[in-house]
Image (tube, rainbow, N blue to C red):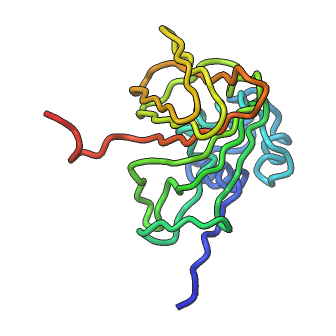
Amino acid sequence: MGKKEVSFKLMGDKIRDLRREKKISSTILAESIGVTPAYISQIERNIVEPSLPVLRNLAKALNVELLFLFEYEAPTDVLITSTGNVMEKTISQANAKYQILTPMRLYNGVKPDMSVMIVKIAGEKTDYDEMVTHDFVEFCYVLEGCIEYRTDKKNYHLSEGDSIYIKRNVPHLLYNPSRKEAKLLAVLGNIHPHLQTR
């Protein structure tokens, strides 16, 4: 039996499809996020990669999570990831690279319980310029180097082999205090119902 390949939908295609699905014109979308219709057209045709602030505004205007714009759909209910179908994504104006290991949508539109990725953060840089929050838990394991996990209340220093679990809606960012690139395994998602305590 032949191997079924995962086909990736480029970010511009996803934005265009979401806009059309919600029956929003490119002009209205452009006005709502403060850019020109021509720029929206370039994004949707995958000519330019939008900056992080523009991506955040697009996600908000299209009523989706920012991470959804970077995810892809899997062709079956069983997810097998090989080196040939892993997508690495660099966000403009961010100092991190994201190697997404799991799709966020299955072939039937069902959303898996979690998203797994490898995150690489450049030396002496933060992953983003400001703290972010999201409505799901986050687990990070340091594979190489070290990081500071900064929340609005406390900073946590993690070395290789250390891990951290952050509850949902906690403002945070990651800082790499060394000159060497840091590499993390990140798991984002919701605790499965059968694992929750009563």
Q: Can you name the residue that lies furthest to the top here?
A: 153
Q: Quadrant of residue 157?
A: top right
Q: Quadrant of residue 119?
A: top right
| Residue 115 appears in the rendering | yes
Q: Can you name the residue that lies furthest to the left here?
A: 198
Q: Residue at x 48, y 67 (%)?
A: 107
Q: Looking at the picture, how far across and down is residue 137, in whole percent?
A: 41, 33
Query: Residue 139 vs residue 144: left or right?
Result: left
Front residue of this view, candidates 114 and 25 = 114
Q: Looking at the picture, how far across and down is residue 183, in whole percent?
A: 65, 39
Q: How many marks?
A: 0
Q: Is residue 90 above or below residue 198?
A: below
Q: Is residue 131 above or below residue 160?
A: above
Q: Looking at the picture, how far across and down is residue 151, in whole percent?
A: 52, 15
| Residue 28 appears in the rendering | no
Q: Quadrant of residue 59?
A: top right
Front residue of this view, candidates 83 and 45 = 83
Q: Residue at x 13, y 33 (%)?
A: 198
Front residue of this view, candidates 95 and 133 = 95
Q: Looking at the picture, how far across and down is residue 153, in whole percent?
A: 48, 8
Q: Can you name the residue that lies furthest to the bottom here?
A: 1
Q: Residue at x 57, y 55 (%)?
A: 101
Q: Residue at x 41, y 54 (%)?
A: 112
